[in-house]
Image (cartoon, coloured by chain):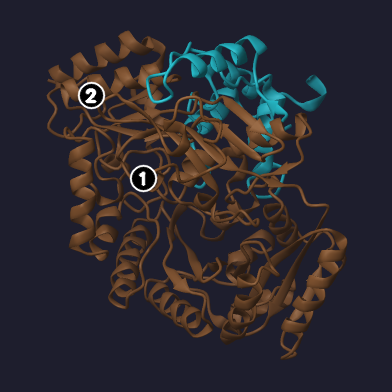
Amino acid sequence: MKIIKLGQIVFGFIFTAILAISPAWSTPEETPHPGFAWQNGAEIYAKICAYCHEAQVGPPIRNRELPPAYIRAIVRNGKRAMPAFRSSEIDDESLVKLVDFISKKETEH
Amino acid sequence: MTSQYIALPKGVAEQTFDAAISSFRNVLGDAAVLTSAEQLAPYIKTMMPVPDANHMPSAALLATTVEQIQKIVAICNQHKVPIWTISTGKNLGYGSAAPAERGQVVLDLKRMNRILEVDKDLAYALVEPGVTYQQLYDYINEHKLGLWLSMPAPTAIAGPVGNTLDRGVGYTPYGEHFLFACGMEVVLANGEVLRTGMGSMPNSNTWQVFKWGYGPYLDGIFTQSNYGIVTKFGFWLMPAPPAFKPFVIQYQHEEDIVEIVETIRPLRINGIIPNAVVIAHALYEAPVIARRSDYVSGPGSISDEAVRKITKDHKLGIWNVYAALYGTQEQIDVNWQIVTQAFGRSGKAKILTEQEMGDDPAFNYRAKLMRGDMTLTEFSLYNWRGGGGSMWFAPVSQARGSETLKQMALTKQILAKYGLDYSGEFIVGMRDMHHIVDVLYDKTDPEQTKAAYQCFDELLTVFSAQGYGTYRVNTAFMDKVAETYGPVQRNVHKTLKHALDPNGILAPGKSGIR
C-alpha cells in the first residue's frame, strides 16, 4: 500500500511512532510546525486573486500601478463583494510580496 | 473608560477578558493573539444584511496544534469566554469568518493546515482544518495520485473540513460531502481528544476506511454543531475516471422543471447519472456572461420578459441542467444513449456537449466543478446586483417535479415582493434536492439591505409553514431556523450541549444551540 505523507520523513516517523506507542484516544503530543507557506507573490496571485481578477469576475488589477497601501487595505478589509483575507491566510510577509507583485508592471518583475 | 478591545464577550468583564487574553498569549505567543481593530478587520466583513457590529469579534487566536487548542479551551472554561471556531473562514453568504454573536473570540485554524495523509490505493485523505481545496489539489497533482476532489463553488479558497462540517455540497459523484466523511479527531470542551469511529481503537489502521466503529455513530453530532473542535478530518476521494463527459440540457420554460425532475430522478437513483446534477435557472448563469444593467433599469425585480431576452441573447435556457458521465468510454457511450433517449422524448430539451459549447464560460466553469477543478467563476453572481450583499436561502425539496415548481414559484413571488431577483438552482441528490437561492442585494443601499433582511425572514417563515425545512443558514438567522424544527429537537440539542460543554464556551448560538 502506497501511503504518501507530506513534510519531512522525520515527521512521518515521529507521527507514526506516537500512534504506535500511545493510546489513540489520548492527547497526541505534537510539535508546532510551520505548516503551509506561500513561496512568492506570483503564487498567491495565481492561486487566489487570478481566479476572479483574470476571469472577468473582478476587475483587472495588474499593470495598473495601484498604490501598495490601497492593495493592502483591500486585501485585509475586502470591498463590496470581494472577501477580506486574514493574516492567517496571507501572512503579513507574504502580503508584502503580493502587493509588490500586483503593484509593479509585468516588465518590472 | 474606553475599552482596549473592539468588543467584549457577552457577560464578561474587561478585567476578566484581560486575564484570558494574557493566558492565550502565554500559550500562543503575542503574534498569534489578535486584538486590534486593524488585525480583526478581515474577521468583520460579512455579506449579511445586518450591522457588522452585531458579529464583531473581541479577539482572534491563531492556533496550530491540538495541544494549544486543549489549553485554549481550559482558559475559556476558567474565564467563561466563548470561542467561535473557523477553518478557512470562507463560508461566504453564510457568515464568512465572523462569529455568531458579538464579542466571541474567533479560534482561527487556518494555519493548522497539514495534509497528514493521502492514500492512493484506498483513495482517502486525512487533513487538518486549515487545508484548502487548492492546497490538496496541488498536492494530489504534484504526487500524481490520480484522485479527484469534490468541492463547493468557492473551491480554491475554501476547504474540505469547514465545508463538510457545515454539510456543504459539491458537484461530482462525491458531491454530498458528509456521506464521504470518514473519521474525525475532536477536541472536546473538557480538553479530551476524541477520535471517532475506528480511530478510538489503539493501533487501528481503519480510521479512514470504515465510518461506523462500534456503538452510536458520533460524527454527525460534530457537524453544524458546537459540541467540539474538529482538528483532524478524514474523507474519501474519487479515483479519476478514464473518461468524463460533461453536458448541459436546456429548457425554455419555467414549468419545464417538472419534466426535468421527473426525467432526472430515475437516472440519478439508478446511477446512470452519478454526480450531483444542477438545474440552474437562467439568472443563476446569466451573471457569468451578462450584466443586469443592460436589461433592467430602476428598482424592482427583473421581469420575465427581460429574462427571456437574456436567454436569447446569450444562448441560455430558462433552465440549464448540468450533469456529467464518468467511467470508461464504453460505459459512457451506453449511459449517454440512455440519457439522450430519456431527455429526447418530449422534444423540449436541447442537449449540448463540450463539442457544441466550446469556450462558453458558463459551461466551462460548470464542467470544472463537475471534475473537481479550481474555479471561482460562480462569484460572478455577486456582480449581478453589486454592493456585496448575499445570503443563501437553502430549503430542501423532494426530487419530484411538482414540488420543485411549487418551491420555485413561491421563492420567486416572495423575492419579487421585495424587489429582488430569483437566482436559484436545484442541486439534485438521489431523492432530495437542495434548492439553493442566492438572495443578492446591494449592501451599500440601506433600503435594499432592509428589504433583503425582511425578504429572507419571510422566505423562512413561509417555507417552514408549508413544511419545507432549510438545511443550512447564515449566522443571523440560525435561531429562527432552529425554531422551525420544533421544541423536541431543540431540547435534545440543548441537552447534548450541556452535557458536553457545561460552561457553553464552544460557539454558542451555532445552529441555535446554547
The answer for which chain carries disc 2 is B
Write down the residue under mark 2: B76
Write down the residue under mark 1: B215
Kind of residue at disc 1? Gly
- Residue B320 occupies which quadrant of the picture? bottom right
Q: In this picture, is B199 found above or below A11?
A: below
Chain A drawing hue: cyan
The residue depicted at 54 percent of the width and 56 percent of the height is B176
Residue B464 is situated, as x and y percent measured from the top left of the image, at: 30, 71
Per the model, the C-alpha gap separating discs 1 and 2 is: 31 Å
Residue B154 is situated, as x and y percent measured from the top left of the image, at: 58, 47
Q: In this picture, is A92 found above or below B336?
A: above
Position of B95 with respect to B79 (left or right) is right
Quadrant showing the C terminus of chain B: top left
The residue depicted at 46 percent of the width and 34 percent of the height is B87
Pick the front one: B237 or B166: B237
Badge 2: how crowded within 10 Å, few (<14), some, or many (20+)? many
Residue B318 is situated, as x and y percent measured from the top left of the image, at: 63, 77
Position of B308 with respect to B449 (left or right) is right
Kind of residue at disc 2? Cys
The residue depicted at 69 percent of the width and 66 percent of the height is B323
Chain with brown colouring: B
Position of B48 with respect to B81 (left or right) is right
- Residue B78 occupies which quadrant of the picture? top left
- For mark 1, give the secondary structure: loop
Pick the front one: B198 or B330: B198
Q: Is residue B203 visible?
A: yes
The answer for which chain carries disc 1 is B
